Protein backbone atom coordinates (compact mmCIF):
# COMPACT_ATOMS: atom_id res chain seq x y z
CA UNK A 1 0.00 0.00 0.00
CA UNK A 2 1.04 3.64 -0.44
CA UNK A 3 1.18 5.75 2.68
CA UNK A 4 -0.37 9.17 2.35
CA UNK A 5 2.42 11.66 2.90
CA UNK A 6 1.80 15.30 3.59
CA UNK A 7 3.36 17.47 0.89
CA UNK A 8 6.98 18.39 1.67
CA UNK A 9 7.79 21.09 -0.86
CA UNK A 10 11.29 22.51 -1.08
CA UNK A 11 11.17 26.31 -1.00
CA UNK A 12 11.77 28.22 -4.22
CA UNK A 13 12.86 31.26 -2.22
CA UNK A 14 16.52 30.30 -2.51
CA UNK A 15 16.62 30.86 -6.27
CA UNK A 16 16.58 34.19 -7.98
CA UNK A 17 15.43 33.68 -11.55
CA UNK A 18 15.93 36.84 -13.55
CA UNK A 19 13.31 37.87 -16.11
CA UNK A 20 15.91 37.68 -18.89
CA UNK A 21 19.42 36.39 -19.49
CA UNK A 22 22.15 37.38 -21.93
CA UNK A 23 25.11 35.34 -23.10
CA UNK A 24 28.17 34.73 -20.92
CA UNK A 25 31.13 35.80 -23.03
CA UNK A 26 34.57 36.82 -21.86
CA UNK A 27 33.59 36.77 -18.20
CA UNK A 28 30.49 38.90 -18.43
CA UNK A 29 26.85 38.72 -19.44
CA UNK A 30 26.24 40.48 -22.75
CA UNK A 31 23.19 40.99 -24.94
CA UNK A 32 23.05 38.66 -27.90
CA UNK A 33 22.71 39.90 -31.48
CA UNK A 34 20.00 37.38 -32.23
CA UNK A 35 16.50 36.66 -31.01
CA UNK A 36 15.51 35.27 -27.64
CA UNK A 37 13.39 32.36 -26.45
CA UNK A 38 11.46 31.40 -23.33
CA UNK A 39 12.37 28.66 -20.92
CA UNK A 40 9.42 27.17 -19.08
CA UNK A 41 8.80 24.92 -16.10
CA UNK A 42 7.72 21.55 -17.52
CA UNK A 43 5.73 20.85 -14.35
CA UNK A 44 3.52 23.94 -14.61
CA UNK A 45 4.20 25.43 -18.08
CA UNK A 46 4.97 28.71 -16.31
CA UNK A 47 7.42 30.93 -18.22
CA UNK A 48 10.58 31.17 -16.12
CA UNK A 49 12.78 33.52 -18.15
CA UNK A 50 13.61 34.94 -21.54
CA UNK A 51 16.97 33.67 -22.78
CA UNK A 52 19.19 34.99 -25.60
CA UNK A 53 19.59 32.89 -28.73
CA UNK A 54 23.19 33.16 -29.89
CA UNK A 55 23.67 33.75 -33.62
CA UNK A 56 26.80 33.47 -35.78
CA UNK A 57 28.24 36.78 -34.52
CA UNK A 58 27.74 35.73 -30.89
CA UNK A 59 29.34 32.34 -31.51
CA UNK A 60 32.29 34.13 -33.18
CA UNK A 61 32.64 36.45 -30.18
CA UNK A 62 32.55 33.57 -27.68
CA UNK A 63 35.14 31.56 -29.60
CA UNK A 64 37.35 34.62 -29.95
CA UNK A 65 37.20 35.20 -26.20
CA UNK A 66 37.99 31.55 -25.56
CA UNK A 67 40.95 31.66 -27.99
CA UNK A 68 42.35 34.78 -26.34
CA UNK A 69 42.01 33.31 -22.87
CA UNK A 70 43.63 30.10 -24.09
CA UNK A 71 46.70 31.70 -25.65
CA UNK A 72 47.26 34.46 -23.15
CA UNK A 73 46.31 32.90 -19.84
CA UNK A 74 44.98 29.41 -19.42
CA UNK A 75 47.37 27.30 -21.51
CA UNK A 76 50.34 29.11 -19.91
CA UNK A 77 49.14 28.68 -16.36
CA UNK A 78 50.83 25.84 -14.43
CA UNK A 79 48.52 22.91 -13.72
CA UNK A 80 48.68 23.47 -9.97
CA UNK A 81 47.29 26.99 -10.48
CA UNK A 82 44.50 25.79 -12.78
CA UNK A 83 43.66 23.21 -10.13
CA UNK A 84 42.99 25.95 -7.59
CA UNK A 85 40.25 27.37 -9.80
CA UNK A 86 38.68 23.94 -10.26
CA UNK A 87 38.73 23.31 -6.52
CA UNK A 88 37.19 26.72 -5.96
CA UNK A 89 34.40 26.00 -8.44
CA UNK A 90 33.79 22.59 -6.82
CA UNK A 91 33.47 24.16 -3.40
CA UNK A 92 31.09 26.84 -4.65
CA UNK A 93 28.97 24.15 -6.32
CA UNK A 94 28.70 22.50 -2.92
CA UNK A 95 28.02 25.73 -1.07
CA UNK A 96 25.32 26.72 -3.56
CA UNK A 97 24.13 23.14 -3.96
CA UNK A 98 20.63 23.74 -2.70
CA UNK A 99 20.12 26.69 -5.00
CA UNK A 100 21.40 24.70 -7.98
CA UNK A 101 19.21 21.71 -7.10
CA UNK A 102 16.04 23.80 -6.80
CA UNK A 103 16.78 25.65 -10.03
CA UNK A 104 17.51 22.38 -11.87
CA UNK A 105 14.25 20.83 -10.69
CA UNK A 106 12.27 23.92 -11.70
CA UNK A 107 13.79 24.17 -15.18
CA UNK A 108 14.11 20.46 -15.95
CA UNK A 109 11.18 18.88 -14.03
CA UNK A 110 13.28 16.27 -12.24
CA UNK A 111 12.51 15.42 -8.59
CA UNK A 112 14.36 17.53 -6.06
CA UNK A 113 15.65 14.42 -4.31
CA UNK A 114 17.51 13.50 -7.51
CA UNK A 115 18.88 16.96 -8.31
CA UNK A 116 19.87 17.38 -4.64
CA UNK A 117 21.33 13.90 -4.06
CA UNK A 118 22.65 12.96 -7.51
CA UNK A 119 23.11 15.78 -10.05
CA UNK A 120 24.67 18.46 -7.87
CA UNK A 121 26.94 16.28 -5.68
CA UNK A 122 28.30 14.39 -8.69
CA UNK A 123 28.82 17.64 -10.61
CA UNK A 124 30.90 18.97 -7.69
CA UNK A 125 32.73 15.64 -7.45
CA UNK A 126 33.74 15.95 -11.11
CA UNK A 127 35.39 19.29 -10.48
CA UNK A 128 37.15 17.94 -7.37
CA UNK A 129 38.32 14.87 -9.27
CA UNK A 130 39.69 16.71 -12.32
CA UNK A 131 41.23 19.41 -10.12
CA UNK A 132 43.36 16.56 -8.80
CA UNK A 133 44.55 15.71 -12.31
CA UNK A 134 45.46 19.26 -13.41
CA UNK A 135 49.04 19.08 -12.07
CA UNK A 136 49.53 15.36 -12.78
CA UNK A 137 48.88 15.20 -16.52
CA UNK A 138 52.29 13.70 -17.17
CA UNK A 139 50.97 10.54 -15.47
CA UNK A 140 47.80 10.42 -17.56
CA UNK A 141 49.35 8.43 -20.38
CA UNK A 142 47.84 10.82 -22.92
CA UNK A 143 50.46 13.58 -23.01
CA UNK A 144 50.32 16.98 -21.38
CA UNK A 145 49.51 19.24 -24.31
CA UNK A 146 46.08 20.88 -24.34
CA UNK A 147 44.13 21.14 -27.59
CA UNK A 148 42.88 24.74 -27.57
CA UNK A 149 39.21 25.80 -27.67
CA UNK A 150 36.58 23.17 -26.94
CA UNK A 151 33.07 23.58 -28.39
CA UNK A 152 30.71 21.62 -26.16
CA UNK A 153 27.01 20.87 -26.67
CA UNK A 154 24.91 19.17 -24.00
CA UNK A 155 21.35 17.79 -23.66
CA UNK A 156 18.53 18.60 -21.25
CA UNK A 157 18.35 15.47 -19.12
CA UNK A 158 21.22 16.26 -16.70
CA UNK A 159 21.97 19.90 -17.50
CA UNK A 160 24.40 20.76 -14.71
CA UNK A 161 25.92 17.30 -14.51
CA UNK A 162 26.62 17.12 -18.26
CA UNK A 163 28.14 20.59 -18.04
CA UNK A 164 30.48 19.35 -15.30
CA UNK A 165 31.40 16.22 -17.31
CA UNK A 166 32.39 18.52 -20.17
CA UNK A 167 33.96 21.55 -18.51
CA UNK A 168 35.94 19.98 -15.64
CA UNK A 169 38.29 17.76 -17.73
CA UNK A 170 38.62 20.43 -20.45
CA UNK A 171 39.83 23.06 -17.97
CA UNK A 172 42.01 20.64 -16.03
CA UNK A 173 43.91 19.86 -19.24
CA UNK A 174 44.41 23.56 -20.06
CA UNK A 175 41.72 24.07 -22.72
CA UNK A 176 39.16 26.86 -22.77
CA UNK A 177 35.49 26.28 -23.42
CA UNK A 178 32.41 27.51 -25.26
CA UNK A 179 29.42 25.50 -24.07
CA UNK A 180 25.85 25.45 -25.35
CA UNK A 181 23.23 24.04 -22.98
CA UNK A 182 19.97 22.58 -24.33
CA UNK A 183 17.25 25.00 -25.29
CA UNK A 184 14.79 23.72 -22.67
CA UNK A 185 17.24 23.77 -19.73
CA UNK A 186 19.62 26.74 -19.87
CA UNK A 187 19.22 28.08 -16.31
CA UNK A 188 21.75 26.07 -14.30
CA UNK A 189 24.41 26.68 -16.97
CA UNK A 190 23.73 30.41 -16.61
CA UNK A 191 24.00 30.10 -12.83
CA UNK A 192 27.26 28.24 -13.39
CA UNK A 193 28.45 31.27 -15.36
CA UNK A 194 27.85 33.37 -12.23
CA UNK A 195 29.83 30.78 -10.27
CA UNK A 196 32.75 31.24 -12.69
CA UNK A 197 32.63 34.96 -11.91
CA UNK A 198 32.45 34.23 -8.18
CA UNK A 199 35.48 31.94 -8.51
CA UNK A 200 37.41 34.73 -10.31
CA UNK A 201 38.00 32.45 -13.26
CA UNK A 202 39.95 34.47 -15.84
CA UNK A 203 37.55 35.97 -18.44
CA UNK A 204 37.04 33.84 -21.54
CA UNK A 205 38.10 30.52 -20.00
CA UNK A 206 34.44 29.46 -19.83
CA UNK A 207 31.83 30.95 -22.17
CA UNK A 208 28.17 29.91 -22.09
CA UNK A 209 26.06 30.58 -25.16
CA UNK A 210 22.38 29.70 -25.10
CA UNK A 211 20.34 28.85 -28.16
CA UNK A 212 18.74 26.06 -30.15
CA UNK A 213 20.14 23.36 -32.40
CA UNK A 214 21.36 25.85 -35.02
CA UNK A 215 23.53 27.61 -32.39
CA UNK A 216 25.00 24.20 -31.53
CA UNK A 217 25.69 23.50 -35.21
CA UNK A 218 27.36 26.90 -35.68
CA UNK A 219 29.55 26.22 -32.65
CA UNK A 220 30.75 22.73 -33.54
CA UNK A 221 31.37 23.62 -37.20
CA UNK A 222 33.31 26.79 -36.40
CA UNK A 223 36.82 26.61 -37.93
CA UNK A 224 38.49 27.95 -34.78
CA UNK A 225 37.16 25.16 -32.55
CA UNK A 226 39.82 22.49 -31.92
CA UNK A 227 37.76 20.00 -29.98
CA UNK A 228 34.07 19.05 -30.22
CA UNK A 229 32.38 17.32 -27.31
CA UNK A 230 28.75 16.42 -27.79
CA UNK A 231 26.17 14.58 -25.71
CA UNK A 232 22.74 14.05 -27.20
CA UNK A 233 20.84 11.97 -29.69
CA UNK A 234 22.44 9.60 -32.17
CA UNK A 235 20.81 11.46 -35.06
CA UNK A 236 22.42 14.79 -34.13
CA UNK A 237 25.69 13.02 -33.26
CA UNK A 238 25.82 11.59 -36.78
CA UNK A 239 25.09 15.02 -38.27
CA UNK A 240 27.96 16.50 -36.26
CA UNK A 241 30.34 13.69 -37.28
CA UNK A 242 29.46 14.39 -40.92
CA UNK A 243 29.84 18.15 -40.48
CA UNK A 244 33.33 17.98 -38.97
CA UNK A 245 34.62 15.09 -41.09
CA UNK A 246 37.77 16.14 -42.93
CA UNK A 247 38.64 18.84 -40.39
CA UNK A 248 41.36 18.31 -37.77
CA UNK A 249 38.93 18.71 -34.88
CA UNK A 250 39.10 16.06 -32.19
CA UNK A 251 35.58 14.73 -31.52
CA UNK A 252 33.86 12.77 -28.75
CA UNK A 253 30.22 11.75 -29.02
CA UNK A 254 28.08 10.47 -26.15
CA UNK A 255 24.83 9.36 -27.77
CA UNK A 256 21.73 7.30 -27.13
CA UNK A 257 21.21 3.84 -25.65
CA UNK A 258 18.78 0.97 -25.24
CA UNK A 259 20.30 -0.89 -22.33
CA UNK A 260 19.45 -4.45 -21.38
CA UNK A 261 18.89 -5.09 -17.69
CA UNK A 262 19.26 -8.87 -17.32
CA UNK A 263 17.66 -10.65 -14.36
CA UNK A 264 18.68 -14.29 -13.83
CA UNK A 265 16.58 -16.68 -11.75
CA UNK A 266 19.11 -16.73 -8.90
CA UNK A 267 19.07 -12.92 -8.54
CA UNK A 268 18.09 -11.32 -5.22
CA UNK A 269 14.63 -10.44 -6.52
CA UNK A 270 13.78 -7.62 -4.10
CA UNK A 271 17.05 -5.86 -4.91
CA UNK A 272 16.56 -6.51 -8.59
CA UNK A 273 13.11 -4.87 -8.46
CA UNK A 274 14.69 -1.76 -6.94
CA UNK A 275 17.37 -1.87 -9.63
CA UNK A 276 14.81 -2.23 -12.42
CA UNK A 277 12.82 0.72 -11.03
CA UNK A 278 15.96 2.82 -10.61
CA UNK A 279 17.13 1.74 -14.04
CA UNK A 280 14.12 3.02 -15.94
CA UNK A 281 12.15 5.43 -13.75
CA UNK A 282 15.09 7.46 -12.37
CA UNK A 283 14.96 10.93 -13.96
CA UNK A 284 11.66 9.99 -15.72
CA UNK A 285 13.66 7.58 -17.87
CA UNK A 286 15.38 10.55 -19.52
CA UNK A 287 18.67 8.72 -19.14
CA UNK A 288 20.89 7.64 -22.03
CA UNK A 289 22.01 4.57 -20.08
CA UNK A 290 18.49 3.74 -18.76
CA UNK A 291 17.73 0.04 -18.36
CA UNK A 292 14.87 0.28 -20.84
CA UNK A 293 14.93 -3.37 -22.00
CA UNK A 294 14.30 -5.76 -19.13
CA UNK A 295 15.39 -9.32 -19.90
CA UNK A 296 13.96 -11.74 -17.32
CA UNK A 297 14.72 -15.45 -17.09
CA UNK A 298 11.50 -17.21 -17.97
CA UNK A 299 11.06 -19.21 -14.75
CA UNK A 300 11.00 -16.07 -12.56
CA UNK A 301 9.07 -13.90 -15.02
CA UNK A 302 5.68 -14.06 -13.24
CA UNK A 303 7.20 -13.31 -9.85
CA UNK A 304 9.31 -10.42 -11.16
CA UNK A 305 6.40 -8.88 -13.06
CA UNK A 306 4.04 -9.10 -10.12
CA UNK A 307 6.52 -7.54 -7.70
CA UNK A 308 7.54 -4.91 -10.23
CA UNK A 309 3.96 -3.76 -10.77
CA UNK A 310 3.40 -3.68 -7.01
CA UNK A 311 6.51 -1.51 -6.59
CA UNK A 312 5.57 0.75 -9.49
CA UNK A 313 2.19 1.35 -7.86
CA UNK A 314 3.99 2.99 -4.94
CA UNK A 315 5.95 5.49 -7.04
CA UNK A 316 4.88 9.05 -6.41
CA UNK A 317 4.51 11.08 -9.57
CA UNK A 318 4.12 14.84 -9.30
CA UNK A 319 5.57 18.14 -8.13
CA UNK A 320 9.34 18.01 -8.74
CA UNK A 321 9.95 20.25 -5.74
CA UNK A 322 8.17 17.89 -3.33
CA UNK A 323 10.78 15.88 -1.44
CA UNK A 324 8.51 12.80 -1.58
CA UNK A 325 8.33 12.78 -5.37
CA UNK A 326 9.91 9.82 -7.18
CA UNK A 327 8.97 10.67 -10.76
CA UNK A 328 8.77 14.27 -11.95
CA UNK A 329 7.63 15.98 -15.14
CA UNK A 330 8.56 15.04 -18.71
CA UNK A 331 10.98 17.71 -19.88
CA UNK A 332 9.00 19.15 -22.79
CA UNK A 333 5.78 18.85 -24.75
CA UNK A 334 7.87 17.60 -27.67
CA UNK A 335 9.43 14.80 -25.61
CA UNK A 336 6.02 13.86 -24.18
CA UNK A 337 4.75 13.61 -27.75
CA UNK A 338 7.61 11.22 -28.64
CA UNK A 339 6.93 9.01 -25.60
CA UNK A 340 3.21 8.87 -26.36
CA UNK A 341 3.81 8.08 -30.00
CA UNK A 342 6.20 5.20 -29.34
CA UNK A 343 3.90 3.83 -26.62
CA UNK A 344 1.03 3.79 -29.11
CA UNK A 345 3.26 2.02 -31.60
CA UNK A 346 4.03 -0.58 -28.90
CA UNK A 347 0.31 -1.34 -28.48
CA UNK A 348 -0.30 -1.34 -32.22
CA UNK A 349 2.51 -3.87 -32.66
CA UNK A 350 0.80 -6.19 -30.18
CA UNK A 351 2.55 -5.57 -26.84
CA UNK A 352 0.50 -5.21 -23.69
CA UNK A 353 0.72 -1.90 -21.87
CA UNK A 354 0.31 -1.43 -18.13
CA UNK A 355 0.71 1.91 -16.34
CA UNK A 356 0.97 2.48 -12.62
CA UNK A 357 -2.27 3.95 -11.30
CA UNK A 358 -1.56 7.57 -10.40
CA UNK A 359 -3.19 10.99 -10.61
CA UNK A 360 -1.32 13.22 -12.98
CA UNK A 361 -1.35 17.00 -12.53
CA UNK A 362 -3.54 18.86 -15.02
CA UNK A 363 -0.88 21.40 -16.11
CA UNK A 364 2.56 20.49 -17.36
CA UNK A 365 3.89 17.40 -19.13
CA UNK A 366 3.38 14.03 -17.46
CA UNK A 367 3.55 10.36 -18.28
CA UNK A 368 2.87 7.54 -15.80
CA UNK A 369 5.49 4.82 -15.14
CA UNK A 370 4.65 2.22 -17.77
CA UNK A 371 5.64 -1.34 -18.57
CA UNK A 372 5.13 -3.24 -21.83
CA UNK A 373 4.97 -7.05 -21.81
CA UNK A 374 4.76 -9.48 -24.69
CA UNK A 375 7.48 -7.50 -26.43
CA UNK A 376 9.47 -9.14 -29.20
CA UNK A 377 12.93 -8.12 -30.34
CA UNK A 378 11.55 -6.77 -33.59
CA UNK A 379 9.14 -4.35 -31.91
CA UNK A 380 10.08 -0.71 -32.17
CA UNK A 381 9.73 -0.29 -28.40
CA UNK A 382 12.48 -2.90 -28.01
CA UNK A 383 14.77 -1.24 -30.54
CA UNK A 384 14.29 2.52 -30.33
CA UNK A 385 15.18 4.78 -27.48
CA UNK A 386 11.96 6.07 -25.89
CA UNK A 387 13.79 8.31 -23.39
CA UNK A 388 10.87 8.24 -20.98
CA UNK A 389 9.44 6.16 -18.10
CA UNK A 390 8.60 3.20 -20.33
CA UNK A 391 10.01 -0.30 -19.82
CA UNK A 392 9.89 -3.10 -22.40
CA UNK A 393 10.03 -6.63 -20.97
CA UNK A 394 11.43 -9.65 -22.83
CA UNK A 395 12.28 -13.13 -21.57
CA UNK A 396 15.11 -15.64 -22.02
CA UNK A 397 15.91 -19.20 -20.98
CA UNK A 398 19.71 -19.53 -21.05
CA UNK A 399 22.64 -17.16 -20.42
CA UNK A 400 23.60 -17.47 -24.10
CA UNK A 401 20.12 -16.33 -25.14
CA UNK A 402 20.29 -13.42 -22.70
CA UNK A 403 23.61 -12.26 -24.15
CA UNK A 404 22.38 -12.67 -27.71
CA UNK A 405 19.26 -10.60 -27.03
CA UNK A 406 21.08 -7.99 -24.97
CA UNK A 407 23.56 -7.37 -27.80
CA UNK A 408 20.86 -7.31 -30.46
CA UNK A 409 20.72 -3.52 -30.63
CA UNK A 410 22.40 -0.79 -32.63
CA UNK A 411 23.39 0.83 -29.33
CA UNK A 412 25.98 -0.18 -26.72
CA UNK A 413 26.10 2.27 -23.86
CA UNK A 414 25.26 0.28 -20.74
CA UNK A 415 23.79 -2.94 -19.34
CA UNK A 416 22.90 -4.54 -16.02
CA UNK A 417 23.28 -8.10 -14.73
CA UNK A 418 21.44 -9.49 -11.71
CA UNK A 419 22.61 -12.85 -10.37
CA UNK A 420 23.97 -14.46 -7.24
CA UNK A 421 26.98 -15.92 -9.06
CA UNK A 422 30.16 -13.88 -9.39
CA UNK A 423 31.46 -16.10 -12.18
CA UNK A 424 28.29 -15.51 -14.20
CA UNK A 425 28.61 -11.75 -13.69
CA UNK A 426 32.14 -11.81 -15.10
CA UNK A 427 31.27 -14.07 -18.02
CA UNK A 428 28.15 -12.13 -19.03
CA UNK A 429 29.74 -8.70 -18.50
CA UNK A 430 32.61 -9.76 -20.75
CA UNK A 431 30.25 -10.82 -23.50
CA UNK A 432 28.10 -7.68 -23.45
CA UNK A 433 28.95 -5.01 -26.02
CA UNK A 434 28.30 -2.08 -23.70
CA UNK A 435 30.57 0.63 -22.36
CA UNK A 436 29.33 0.24 -18.78
CA UNK A 437 28.00 -2.95 -17.18
CA UNK A 438 26.52 -2.77 -13.71
CA UNK A 439 26.31 -5.92 -11.59
CA UNK A 440 23.50 -6.17 -9.02
CA UNK A 441 23.01 -2.41 -9.22
CA UNK A 442 22.14 0.14 -11.89
CA UNK A 443 22.66 3.80 -12.80
CA UNK A 444 25.62 4.35 -10.50
CA UNK A 445 27.95 7.17 -11.54
CA UNK A 446 31.34 8.18 -10.25
CA UNK A 447 33.81 10.74 -11.60
CA UNK A 448 36.67 8.25 -11.34
CA UNK A 449 34.96 5.77 -13.66
CA UNK A 450 35.02 6.13 -17.46
CA UNK A 451 31.66 6.28 -19.25
CA UNK A 452 30.90 5.98 -22.95
CA UNK A 453 29.54 3.80 -25.68
CA UNK A 454 30.04 1.24 -28.40
CA UNK A 455 28.40 1.27 -31.83
CA UNK A 456 25.71 3.95 -32.26
CA UNK A 457 26.11 5.07 -28.64
CA UNK A 458 29.14 7.07 -29.74
CA UNK A 459 32.87 7.17 -29.19
CA UNK A 460 35.28 8.52 -26.62
CA UNK A 461 35.05 8.28 -22.85
CA UNK A 462 34.12 10.81 -20.18
CA UNK A 463 35.16 10.45 -16.56
CA UNK A 464 38.19 8.87 -14.96
CA UNK A 465 41.71 8.95 -16.36
CA UNK A 466 40.29 7.93 -19.73
CA UNK A 467 38.27 11.15 -19.83
CA UNK A 468 41.52 13.13 -20.11
CA UNK A 469 42.34 11.65 -23.50
CA UNK A 470 39.61 13.70 -25.16
CA UNK A 471 41.29 16.95 -24.09
CA UNK A 472 44.98 16.20 -24.54
CA UNK A 473 47.26 15.77 -27.50
CA UNK A 474 50.36 13.59 -27.35
CA UNK A 475 51.91 15.68 -30.15
CA UNK A 476 51.91 19.26 -28.95
CA UNK A 477 49.64 20.67 -31.65
CA UNK A 478 48.12 23.51 -29.67
CA UNK A 479 47.67 26.81 -31.48
P1 LIG B 1 19.60 16.33 -29.15
O1 LIG B 1 18.41 16.76 -29.89
O2 LIG B 1 20.63 15.57 -29.86
O3 LIG B 1 20.21 17.63 -28.50
C1 LIG B 1 21.40 17.65 -27.76
C2 LIG B 1 22.02 19.02 -27.85
O4 LIG B 1 22.44 19.26 -29.20
C3 LIG B 1 21.09 20.17 -27.49
O5 LIG B 1 21.84 21.19 -26.88
C4 LIG B 1 20.60 20.58 -28.86
O6 LIG B 1 20.09 21.89 -28.87
C5 LIG B 1 21.85 20.46 -29.67
N1 LIG B 1 21.68 20.30 -31.11
C6 LIG B 1 20.56 19.97 -31.81
N2 LIG B 1 20.84 19.90 -33.13
C7 LIG B 1 22.16 20.19 -33.27
C8 LIG B 1 23.06 20.24 -34.39
N3 LIG B 1 22.67 19.98 -35.63
N4 LIG B 1 24.37 20.55 -34.15
C9 LIG B 1 24.81 20.78 -32.91
N5 LIG B 1 24.01 20.75 -31.82
C10 LIG B 1 22.70 20.45 -31.99
O7 LIG B 1 19.26 15.42 -27.92
P2 LIG B 1 18.25 15.75 -26.75
O8 LIG B 1 16.87 15.54 -27.25
O9 LIG B 1 18.58 17.04 -26.16
O10 LIG B 1 18.67 14.61 -25.68
C11 LIG B 1 18.21 13.33 -25.75
C12 LIG B 1 19.22 12.40 -26.36
O11 LIG B 1 20.51 12.57 -25.80
C13 LIG B 1 18.88 10.96 -26.14
O12 LIG B 1 19.01 10.25 -27.35
C14 LIG B 1 19.90 10.48 -25.14
O13 LIG B 1 20.20 9.14 -25.17
C15 LIG B 1 21.06 11.30 -25.45
N6 LIG B 1 21.92 11.44 -24.28
C16 LIG B 1 23.08 10.75 -24.26
C17 LIG B 1 23.90 10.83 -23.15
C18 LIG B 1 25.17 10.07 -23.15
S1 LIG B 1 26.22 10.37 -22.01
N7 LIG B 1 25.46 9.19 -24.06
C19 LIG B 1 23.56 11.63 -22.09
C20 LIG B 1 22.38 12.33 -22.13
C21 LIG B 1 21.56 12.23 -23.26
P3 LIG B 1 18.52 22.11 -28.53
O14 LIG B 1 18.30 21.59 -27.17
O15 LIG B 1 18.35 23.54 -28.58
O16 LIG B 1 17.78 21.35 -29.59
Image (cartoon, rainbow, N blue to C red):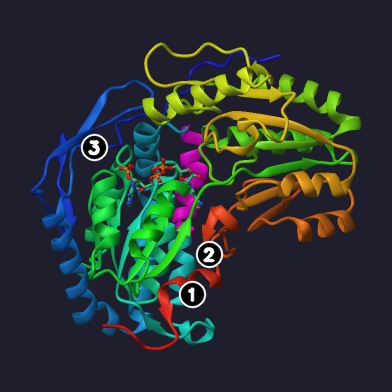
Of residues 399 and 79, the one nearer the viewer is 399
Residue 400 is a magenta residue: no
Contact, mark 2 vs mark 1 (Cβ under 8 Å): yes
Residue 246 picture location, percent across and down: 35, 71
- Where, by quadrant of the figure, is residue 10 drawn? top left
Q: Quick one: label 1 or label 3, which is nearer the N terminus?
A: 3
Regarding mark 1 in the picture, which secondary structure is present there? helix
The alpha-carbon separation of the residues under discs 2 and 1 comes to: 8 Å
Span shown in magenta: 111-125
Identify the mark nearer the N-term, 2 or 1. Answer: 2
The residue carrying mark 3 is 16
Q: Residue at x 39, y 35 (%)?
A: 108
Residue where numbered disc 2 is placed: 461
Pinpoint residue 2: horizontal percent, then vertical percent. Answer: 66, 15
Query: Which corner quadrant of the image does residue 249 belong to?
Result: bottom left
Q: Mark 1 highlights which residue? A: 469
Amino acid sequence: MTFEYAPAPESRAIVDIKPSYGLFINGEFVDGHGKSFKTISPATEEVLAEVAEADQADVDAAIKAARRAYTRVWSRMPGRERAKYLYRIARILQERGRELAVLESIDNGKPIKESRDVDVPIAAAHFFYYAGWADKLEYSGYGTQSLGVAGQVIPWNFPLLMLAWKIAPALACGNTVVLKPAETTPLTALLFAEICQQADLPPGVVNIITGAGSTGATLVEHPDVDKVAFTGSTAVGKAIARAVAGSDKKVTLELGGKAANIVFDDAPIDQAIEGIVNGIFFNQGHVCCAGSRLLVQENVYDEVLERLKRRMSTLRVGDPLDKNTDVGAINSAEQLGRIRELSEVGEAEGSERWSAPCDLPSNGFWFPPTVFTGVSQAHRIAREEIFGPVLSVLTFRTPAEAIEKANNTPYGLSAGVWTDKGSRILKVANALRAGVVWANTFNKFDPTSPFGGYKESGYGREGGRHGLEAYLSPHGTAK
